[in-house]
Amino acid sequence: MSSSRVAVDAAPARRDGSGAVAKLRRLRTEYARLGVPLALVVALLAIAAWRVPQLFTVVGLAGAILVAAPLMLATMAITPIAMAGRGGVDLSIGPAVGFINVTIVTWLVSAGIEHPGLVFVYAMLAGVLWQLMVGAAIVFVRVSPIIVTLAGFMILQGLNLVILPRPGGLAPDWLSDWGYGTTLFGPVLAVLVGAFLFWYAFTRTALFTHLKLMGSDERTAFACGVDVTRVRLLAHLIGGVFIGLAAICQTALIGSGDPTQGNQLTLQAITALVLGGTALSGGRGGALGSVLGATAMYLIFVVLSSFNFGAISGFMTQMSYGLILVAALLLSLLGTRPGRDARVAA
Amino acid sequence: MRLSGVGKHFGETRALAGATLTAVGGEIHAVVGENGSGKSTLAKVISGVVLPDEGGVDVCGVHPANPRAARDAGIVTIYQEILLADDLTVLDNLFAGIDGLLRHREGRAVRHERASVLLERLVGEPVDPDRLVSTLPLSVRQWIVIARALLLEPRVLVFDESSAALDLEATERLHAEMLALRDRGACVLLVTHRIAELVKIADRATVLRDGATVGSLGRDEISEARLLELMSATARSRCRVVRAKSTDPVRRAVLVTEALQLSCAAVPIDFRLDAGEIAGIAGLDGAGQAGFVRALAGIDIPFSGQVTSIGTTGDARPIRTVDEAEQGGVTYVSGDRRREGLFPDLSIQENFGLAMMDRRVTRLGILDREGIRQDFEQEARTLKLRYGHADDRITTLSGGNQQKVLIARALARRARVIVLNDPTRGVDIGTKQDLYEQLRLFADGGGAVVFLSSELEEFFGLADRVDVFRADSVFATCRGADQIAEAPLLAALFGQADSAARPLRSGSPPDSGPRSIAPGTCP
């Protein structure tokens, strides 16, 4: 008798509880991959607070945002492309950012097109067009992404030097002004927030689910009737929008054109992408992780420059990127070992 | 829905040759046939995954050209493989492909509710739609695939052998779903080789053989006997029979298994292969026969039990790895040449010579190419290999001749036991004959052969006995010319209930008799 009453009482309570638990579990499964990059960023912030306290002033933070923004946006640009699967990591990202940078300070400035709206439209359109070409070659010509984007890397690298043989030129005045970075809530932060809102809207679409589905298992996606061609192409186009934004922030940072600086951005962005927990095999990932990864990269750079390595500090930074990348991958492997949950389920 | 004269080739293989099928709404229509009779290909044609080479497909007035077009026409297919994206949640998998490009058709909460209700009804217990698919057991994944199809409210639902992972009680629930769909006016197309299942549930049955429709039965005509009769009608072109010579009176075992279990609940197999014997292995897809021959050759590790090879001097060696199989004189020849046999970028001779790498080397460790060439030419002569030049790429050969090179490789290893896993897939009839003759010669010379085939007529006149697999164990063993024939083999394959067709003779060893397929206990 009493046991039955307990059961009756317990039932509604359990339903309420299970709703919250389910929501929690969903968040956990969705954001589990962020654990390692988040821990890394927190640890690096702690070290930075000790070594570089000036980072935590208004000027320090404004400068940090300014310097880190191009890498953050570049990493966000290659996130949807990597999530689409087939090992689709975009090597051409760096020179593509560089291309937009040099064309803004040469073509646009010499044509007198300096209006902020027009420059933004140009940058994003150029990024989208470039990704349209890359994506079309991958989707329709069926060339492996790594080859297409490697070729794109070399083509743009050369083209940038043709357009602007050596660093120089002047960015439009309003864009150069962004580069002073004296206020915390400056225009670069606004671009970052805008990019994030765009990404958030993207994750709410069915397209994003299809993208994850396709990256996780392309055969399943095809058999379920997902238009894999269109989804892959759109992933590239969305990446192109972020390339444009990255180029704007890069131009604001240096205030001029630099045909070669973008090249390093490729390797840094891929490192940040992997640090942020996006799987290069596709299916898993997100902009939050990519931003965390890029932040970690920036903090490593800041912390290391506070030590006096003299002439070799650049090499130390490179080496640290590599070591931390390996360590992060090992940690996330331990964290997401399959079978633990499966065994519980069985 | 109407399909007429549909034909489809895959390379040299003819999967469908004029299959015809007419199904209407409000019926459960079964498509039956042996392995390789083209029933799966037919299902893929209907769902737009495979485009037919010839013939017309008309499903509700549409000709589906890809899976999406088929789905838009109301045709939903549940495939043999469990197609799920493991990294995504149950919910995302359930509603995959339903949405438009950008917009979700309905809110997340609505979906969550629908998914929970449907999954609870199907699985029999609540399943959290927010879980990742990779954390769920196989049977639940199977249900997710089925639920995904049901959510689309299909007009035509194609089940391609999709109840394999379900137990008896779950199958009952699935049948209830099928009946409900039928009563709503949908057409349920059930592609199966589980005859017992379809006798119970199907309203009509179309029987396929060798890619062509051989008959269509109404509700009252469907019976096991009638279906088997149609599937095995003798109009086939029989291949020339290779006579078995009288075997050695002294029987000497060369390969035995002790209490070999292929899965947890399977009945243990005590298999014995004698010198001079050709043992056929038959079974429907997934009955465990492929796992068994792979375990014999040390390629797969069985669930439990032991494989032992016995040498000429009576020395027994366990076989647990491919290396140990090799040392015990057991060689494996796969029918899946592309994946498990050939190196397509290497020449014919290099493909052959892989077996000789340890023997044909000079003292300095350099390959003796001349010696390999002589070995190759000798084997090529005995096998009647047709080739241009030994240095040509192996892919210049026809499928049958490629297979001959692989068998030559096995023979050159001086194997005492050759394990063949469906070696004649995509091989023409003349080459098959050459292969049979070589196998017979090999056996008469003291070797032993384990020959798995998905085509029953290959055993006629070749095999000394045929072990028929069901539920990961030997269900029956057929011996002698009258037993190794179409009717008794088919009866054993499909496990007909009446004992008339139980292919046992009094002389058979008791341990290979028909077994109950009730689950045993796990060690």
Image: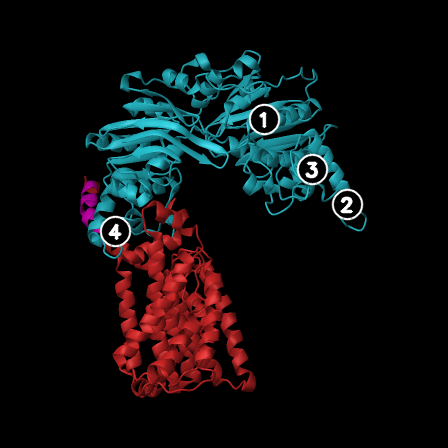
Chain colours: A red, B cyan
User: The residue tagged with tag 4: helix, strand or loop?
Assistant: loop
Residue at mark 2: B368
**3D distance between C-alphas at marks 1 and 3:** 33 Å
Q: Is residue A325 left or right of residue A32?
A: right
User: Residue A344 location, x and y as percent?
Assistant: 39, 48
| Amino acid type, callout 1 | Gly
Question: Which of B292 and B418 lies nearest the eye of the viewer?
Answer: B418
User: Looking at the picture, does residue B4 appear above or below residue B501?
Assistant: below
Residue at mark 1: B430
Q: Residues within 10 Å of mark 2 (few under 14, many from 20)?
A: some
Residue at mark 4: B99
Q: Which residues are magenta?
A: A4-17
User: The residue tagged with tag 1: helix, strand or loop?
Assistant: helix
Which disc number belongs to residue B327?
3
Instruction: Tell whether label 3 touches label 1 (CB within 8 Å).
Output: no
Q: Which image quadrant is residue A242 in?
A: bottom left
Q: Decide which of tag 3 and tag 2 comes sooner along the chain.
A: 3
Q: Residues within 10 Å of mark 3 (few under 14, many from 20)?
A: some
